[in-house]
Image: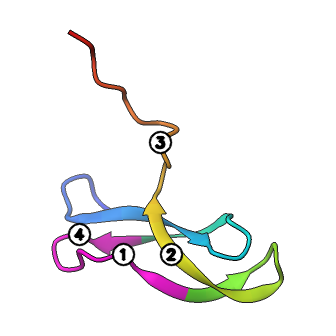
Amino acid sequence: MPKKNSKRKVIGLVSEVSGHRSYYTTKNTQNTTEKISLKKYDPVARVHAVYTETKKSLGRNEIKPRKG
């Protein structure tokens, strides 16, 4: 895990074949602003597939802004 005050953020990689998140990595958001695409093995589909970057939590643990 990256340190709390570092510029590296944790990202999840989602398979384009099966749609599952099987891999996580860190990325320096200041140097690399575009989305990452990597070719990795998909254990669900049992083939090599292209994985694209998404947020780690995908909105499950995000704090909603207050109304008012």
Identify which residue, 68 or 26, lies in the foreground: 68
The amino acid sitting under disc 3 is Gly
Identify which residue, 38 or 16, lies in the foreground: 16
The amino acid sitting under disc 4 is Thr
Q: Which residues are magenta?
A: 26-38
- Residue 67 lies left or right of residue 15; in this view the side is left
Could you classify mark 1 by the number of other residues whose Cα lies within 10 Å: few (under 14), some (14-19), or many (20 or more)?
few
CB atoms at circles 2 and 4 under 8 Å apart? no
Label 2, on which residue? 52
Residue 67 percent location from the top left of the image: 26, 13
Q: Earlier in the sequence, mark 4 or mark 3?
A: 4
The amino acid sitting under disc 1 is Lys
Q: Earlier in the sequence, mark 4 or mark 1?
A: 4
Residue 39 percent location from the top left of the image: 58, 90
Mark number, residue 50: none
Display colour scheme: rainbow
State the separation of the CA atoms marked 4 and 1.
10 Å
CB atoms at circles 1 and 2 under 8 Å apart? yes
Vertical arrangement, residue 21 with respect to residue 62, above or below: below
Label 3, on which residue? 59
